[in-house]
Structures are given as structure tokens and as C-alpha cells.
Image: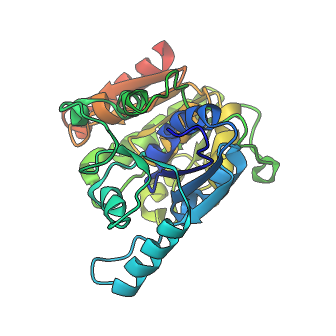
Amino acid sequence: MPAAAQSILVIKLAALGDFIQALGPLAAIRRHHSDAKITLLTTAPFRALAQASGYVDEVWCDGRPSILAVSEWLALRSRLRSGGFDRVYDLQTSDRSSHYFRLFWPGPAPEWSGIARGCSHPHTNPARDLMHTTERQREQLAMAGIEDVPVADVSWAEANVTRFDLAEKFALIVPGGALHRPAKRWPVENFAALAVRLSDRGLQPVLLGGEGEAGTFAPIMAACPEAVYLAGQTDLFDLAELGRRAALAVGNDTGPMHMIAATGCKSLVLYSDASDPALCAQRGERVAILHREYLEDLKVDEVERDLDNS
């Protein structure tokens, strides 16, 4: 990279788990380019978190235009070309983000770390898609000259959670997940039984999730009235603060568990064969993975035992 290079673009669009796992690479890029202006191209849900991280100087939001939105693509092309970027780190490495490299045609194009055809610093490992996200990004950056990529650190993501009026000892439960992937969800009646057991042990169950998941949480609240319903009431900063304060957390393979795990919270994440923990498992100091081919075969006793042993 030219010594005078002063402008860096990092691309990381979605989703929550992927964004959390990109925080280590973002920190490494910031350290490597300590004097450069670093711009992050991301999506709206992650703007505030990125701004608070200290890793970037400016955040651009990508509307991810549809293939037929010609005017939006032209506007994106104009913005990218006017940025004066010396190097781009594409941490999304998707077909979409690789297409952004082609928006610089006919040139000049910045140096580019990613998988776009013809880029200056390609991640050339043919087995990259078989690597965990964390190792894959570390190798990508190493090929671009950046070594020593740290683990994700969210200690700077602080919030005042006293408004939730929680008990001194509480456990986070994340029973939801993508609606279109029901195989990634442990049966809600099992979460309900687990909530009762945690309450009996003196831990207040705190239910986390997104808006519109009332149907998921209703059986848990019915079985365990002591549980606190916070679905749709927390932002990403709240998740980090709750993770640091919680005695433990248990949930499906879903975005909030990535944030909670990164705080150092004792976390148990439940996986079916619908996703592969070898490629995308939550990372943290105290994370355990419990994997079954089908989550309906996973018993409450097994989950409780793993929480005790993890």
C-alpha cells in the first residue's frame, strides 16, 4: 500500500452475528492504519454501534439497491468513486460486495482486499468457505498485510439498563430466531421448562428477542410468570450491558447470542444441522455449543446439565 495512502473503506453490511465477528478485524485495520481516515459501509442497524466503537471515522449506510434500481446503483457508484479511497477491505465478501469493486470501472480502482475478480489483494484460499468466519477474516487480512487480529471486544458498548428493574441475579434466554428457519429453534415448550428451572434456582429469566415474537414468548411467560419480557425493548448496547451483568445466557443460533457471547457471559448456544457451528459459532471466553441433528431431540435435562458444566 502506498505510504501516502490516507483513506480506507471497510465493507461489512450484515447480519448481526457477522457484524460482531467483524469487530476484531475492524480493530486490526484501525491499528494498522492508525493515521488514515477509515469509512465503514454498513447497514442502518449497525450505524450507532460502529460509531461508538472508535474503529472508524465515518459510517455510510448502504441501502442495498435491488438489481433493477438503476438510479440507486448510479448513486452508489458515484459515492464510492468520489470517496478517494486508497484501499478497500471487503469483509462481507459476498457477490454483492464484490460487485462494488466493479463499480470503479473503468478506473482508477483502489487496492482491494476481498474475493472480487481482479482485485489487488485477493483471499485466494480455495477452502475459505469451509473456514469459520473468524479464521477466514484473519487469513484474508494476513494476505493483505495485517497480522494479529484480536477477538471481538464490545467492552465499549455501554448502556443504562436500570430501567428494566431486573433482579440482582438473572439469566438471559434467547428463544427466537429467523422465522423462515424453524429448524434452528429449540421447541418453545422446552425453553418454558428451562425458564421454570432457572427461576427455581434463584435466577430471574429475562427473555430477549425482536419485535413480533410474542407468539414465541407467550408459552414461556405462561409457564414462568417470574420471567421478564424484553423482546423488542433492547438495542445492541442494551444487549452488551445485559450480557456483562447476567449470570448466564442460553439461546438458539441467532444474532443476539453473538453479542452476548462477546461480552464474556457464560453462554450456551443450541445448534441443529440447519447451521454449522464449525463455520459460524459464537465466540467468547465462556461459550459452549450444544449440537443435535434436530433440536426437538434435545432434552431440557441435557441443556441444564451443560449449563452447569460449561
Q: Nearer the viewer, residue 226 or 286?
A: 286
- 63 left or right of 107 in image: right
Farthest top residue in view: 309
Q: How is the image coloured?
A: rainbow
Q: Is residue 142 above or below residue 220?
A: above
- Tally the numbered discs: 0
- 6 left or right of 210 in image: right
Residue 279, image x, y percentages: 30, 33
* Residue at x 64%, y 27% (from the top left corner): 247
Q: Is residue 158 above or below residue 104?
A: above
* Residue at x 58%, y 45% (from the top left corner): 5
Say whether residue 179 is visible: no
Residue 309, image x, y percentages: 47, 13
Say whether residue 138 is visible: yes
Q: Is residue 18 above or below residue 302?
A: below
Residue 304, image x, y percentages: 44, 24
Residue 111, image x, y percentages: 42, 47
Q: Nearer the viewer, residue 110 or 114?
A: 110
Q: Is residue 103 above or below residue 134?
A: below
